Image: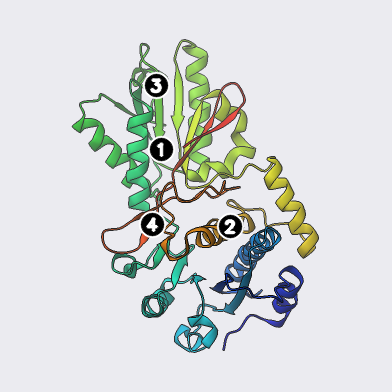
Amino acid sequence: MNRIPSYFVALLVALLTLSTVSAKTLRLGVMLPLHDDNGDGRRMVEYYRGVLMACDSLKKSGLSIDVHAWNTPEDCNVSEVLKDPAVAACDLIIGPLYSRQVRALSDFVERHDIKLLIPFSITAPPLYTNRNIYQVYQNANDFSNRSITTFLTQFQGYHPVIIDCNDSTSKKGTFTFGLRRKLEERGIAYNLTNLKSGEGAFFKAFSTEQPNIVVLNTGRHQELGVALAKLNGLRTSHPQLNISMFGYTEWLGYTRLYLDKFYKYNVFVPSPFYTNLTASATLRLQQKYRWNFHQDMQQMLPRMALTGFDHAMFFLSGLNQYGKDFNGEKGQSAYKAVQTPLVFERIGNGGLRNRTLLLVNYQPSQQTVLIK
């Protein structure tokens, strides 16, 4: 068996002293690579610690939770893990990380009527047939389509300017080509320009009568830096121009480099999460993490511990309130996420996928606002 390593057992006992198991006990299983061998393991260890912190918070509010965890690295035979009788007793299983492990887990939870939360894997074909599956991550096409819909709603009356950044490695074509197609279908005029265009040609792509919304065809910070410098030059020569920008989730990681420019150009970033590192709830959880685990969370976005905390709080509180009827759809949960809000919708007759998209708006007033 790939049971949780011994050092996690001690951690679990310290955080969750669940000696009295009531009739309303929720049984949670976690199947993730819980090890220190590589980056996957270390990220999932932090995620799991966030899950444990959520269980600790819920326990203090009177909820009884029985937690079982299994270490399932990439080469793990999940079918062997599923022979453990404790798995079949779970109300909810979180996992797996690796797509190749999804099928066996999917078949198991369908037979035993257990909810399966897939927190990270994007490839999960059983989602379309198994009503017990919840997939958090949206694939690139789905997220691009949702971003396009949000763009068209948010920027009515704007003049779109799409800048070719000459990045041959870019994977943003799904969004930019899809956006252009929708703009053309709606008869909305837009202009194309290039980072290498001269000042005159670059200026001609912008409207002096409408507010402009700029879109780059890459998410890389190198090209973003060049584009911001070019916009600075344009603004110096033509201060009357009204310019906003629509970016990509990766841009959330560039705020240390470009925050002032984000404010200056009223940047909007579509994202399934937002980490406000100065919010009181975030600071409390960061401090609790230090106390419990004697180290800080890893410096990444999103924070893995906060992700695990939000996932566990959302599902366990929902299951406690609604039981088997909990499906995570809009209106079923009052939980206010610290970082990773969840709203699920059913895919045909299959499972449910998270549909959350936030617009993170860096406003010229030096405020960061979430548009949901």
The mark found on residue 353 in the picture is 4
Q: Nearer the viewer, mark 4 or mark 3?
A: 4
Where's residue 284, x and y in %? 73, 49
Instruction: Reply above or below: 137 against 161.
Output: below
Q: Nearer the viewer, mark 1 or mark 2?
A: 2
Instruction: Reply above or below: 50 against 105.
Output: above
Distance, label 4 to label 3, CA atoms, is 33 Å
Instruction: Reply above or below: 32 against 87.
Output: above
Q: Relative to the observer, which residue lies in front, 80 or 20?
A: 20
Counting other residues with Cα less than 10 Å from the Cα at mark 2, is it few (<14), some (14-19), or many (20 or more)?
A: many
Quadrant in which residue 181 is drawn: top left
User: Measuring 37% from the left and 46% from the top, which residue is drawn there?
Assistant: 172
User: Measuring 28% from the left and 68% from the top, which residue is drawn there?
Assistant: 129
Q: Relative to the observer, which residue lies in front, 132 or 73?
A: 132
Quarter of the image where the N terminus is located: bottom right
Distance, label 1 to label 2, CA atoms, is 41 Å
Q: Nearer the viewer, mark 4 or mark 2?
A: 2
Where's residue 211, x and y in %? 40, 18
Identify residue for label 1.
165
The mark found on residue 291 in the picture is none
